[in-house]
Amino acid sequence: MRYQEAHAAKSGSVPFTLRGKKLSRTVLATAVAGAIGLVPAVMVPSPAFAVVAGDLTITPNTPSEGSPLTFSVTSSTVAAPTGVTWSTSDGTAKAGSDYNAVTGQTITWGGATTAWTATLSVTTLNDNLYEGPETVNLNIYDTATSTTTAVKTSVGTITDLQTAPTVNITPAAAPEGNSGWHAQTYSVNLSPGMQAATSLRWTAAVGAGTATDGTDFKGATGTLDFASGETSKTFTVDVNGDTSYEGDETFEIALDHFYLAGTTNASAVVAPGGPFTETITDDDAKPTYTISDIKMDEGDGPMAALVEVKLSNPTKSTATFTVSSTDITADSGQFVVTNAPSGVGTNDYGLALTTATVAAGKDTGYGFILINGDSIFEPDETATLSVVPNAGTIAASILGSQAAVNSKLTLVNDDKAPQLEVDNATVDQGGSVALTGTTTGISQSDTPFNLSFMGGGDHPASTSDFMPPANMSPIVPAGTASGSKVQLGTLTASKPSHPQSDKTVIVSGTGFGGATVKEGWVTIKGNAPAVELTLKAPTWSTGGVDVPLSGTAEAGATVDLWAAPISASEPDLMKVASTKADKDGEFWFKRTIMQGYRFKVASGGDTSDEKWVRVTQMPVFSAVSSAKGMVTFTVQGTPKGVGQVVIVQKWVGGKWVNTWKGVTASNGQFKWSGKNASGALTVRAFVQGYTPNGIAGGYSAQKKITVK
């Protein structure tokens, strides 16, 4: 409005000009005219007062999520704007999850002319997810002109209460197990979760770890996709479980940057950190080791014996042990095949391999010793074998706390104790003889014997017939070679006052420590004439009867009867009886035989000629007539047998005629019954023999009967 003074002076009126929007000018002009009395004052409705962008100033605060986001709005218009609304729209924040949206809300103004104010408040939401600062757009509309195109906009920022998420992997350690390859699950955990969907790449590799790729685990890589708000994802790595002790082992899992979902662009939100060390926990017990006792025959020559080192369970690495020995009664002189031992029965064994190796993944290793077998009689011998882990090796680090392990080596003597065989000797009456013995076997130590001298044999000497050696306890020195002659002392024979036959002294005895004595004979030669050993026996014997046998031998001598049946197989004769000759040198035997037999006698080392005694059948014959015109014959051979041929003859016209024939049954008898003419009947029976068994056929006595 411009005031024009000239016009006012002439007309008494106050001219003015109103500028602005037509509606505003009209309202203002009416108000002014009423005020100065030009027209009556009339009350009219207030019209809407529009705004333009330049009229408004907007200042947002920067709240934390969960606190109100406010916009302070100031209008520089003369009158408070009307018909002005405000709405929100998403910047980087999302309505419904980060804030509550506002749509078409009217602004209520306060203040005064040219300083109208309003505070617009937006409710923000705390989602407990990391998202960083986020923005909300404020849009102010003049509804008189447009409800879709904002007159003025502003951007408010919501500060995130959550810090950037931390990342970890669980579990940090997992047992390896015992059943081979298996999938071990690992979790990648975010705290807090992220609002944005993201991807994360992982890689399992040895890195700075101690595990072996392909043996303890399998290196791998993969991608994990986290949805909005998701805090945990899992993946698997193959781990190899075994029963070998190896200690805990490690590998690394590296995480690459977070990536925006569906892209390969690294997110600037957060780096995951790492790499993360993962431990494969060894769930196998720390092994212990043992060695077994060795007990074996020493043998007669060089041979090897294994020293077995046994682990309770395998280790991942090769383990080596030192094997040593301590003599108890065995001797561990250096074993040299081409050299004789320095002492009798020494140099029993030697350590040939003093290191026992147990390969990785195995539970058994071996050292070995050489056993020097011999033919020397000696006690069982022993030594202590010891095993300790080699210093500075994996075996020492794993097993070093275990005390040394011992076992017992026992070499069992398999050689016979020496035998002393007394050599036979002969001495004249009144003379003396140096007795000797022959050894069999070798002993590591001296072997004492006790000898005894006494009469024996067919013509035993009495104690008055000889004087034994003064020392009857000879000793065979250690190491005496087998087959050596040993002096046993001198035996002296007495001179009798009258002629005597040869007499015998038996030299026997016992040895110590299992040694034995094989007896020998000393013959004191007599001066009496020799007596011939004879046997008398009949050539034939009838039936199964006692056969008398007799003969001559040295007076008082023992006579053995030897016999065997006559047979095509010619069996060896066996001793069947013994007797002594009387003072006149005569002897007798009786033997019942059922077939032909061969006989001979033996005495004092002499043997008689063999005599054969054959048997002639002597049948038992019965002939009876128990009914008219009937006759019954029963025949049994002597010797009795099954299947023997039987013939019954009758006397006819001055001669014997074969009339009835058969064989003996299982009871050894032949029986016949049948018709025969009444009257006198003379019969006899014949039983056939068997020549290979020295049996000849024979006739019974004749029988005279009257047939009814």
Image (cartoon, grey):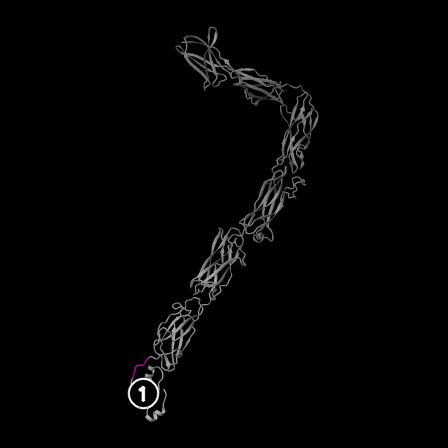
Region in magenta: 43-47
Asked which quadrant contains residue 432, the reply is top right
Asked which quadrant contains residue 17, the reply is bottom left
Residue 213 percent across, percent down from the top left: 53, 55
Q: Is residue 324 left or right of residue 223?
A: right
Could you tell me which quadrant the C terminus lies in? top left
Residue 48 percent across, percent down from the top left: 33, 79
Q: Is residue 508 above or below residue 303?
A: above
Q: Residue furthest bottom?
A: 10
Q: Nearer the viewer, residue 640 or 544?
A: 640
Say if the magenta span includes residue 165: no
Q: Is residue 407 above or below residue 588?
A: below
Say which amino acid is labelled 1: Ala
Could you tell me which quadrant the N terminus lies in? bottom left
Residue of label 1: 33
Residue at position x 42%, y 73% in the image? 155
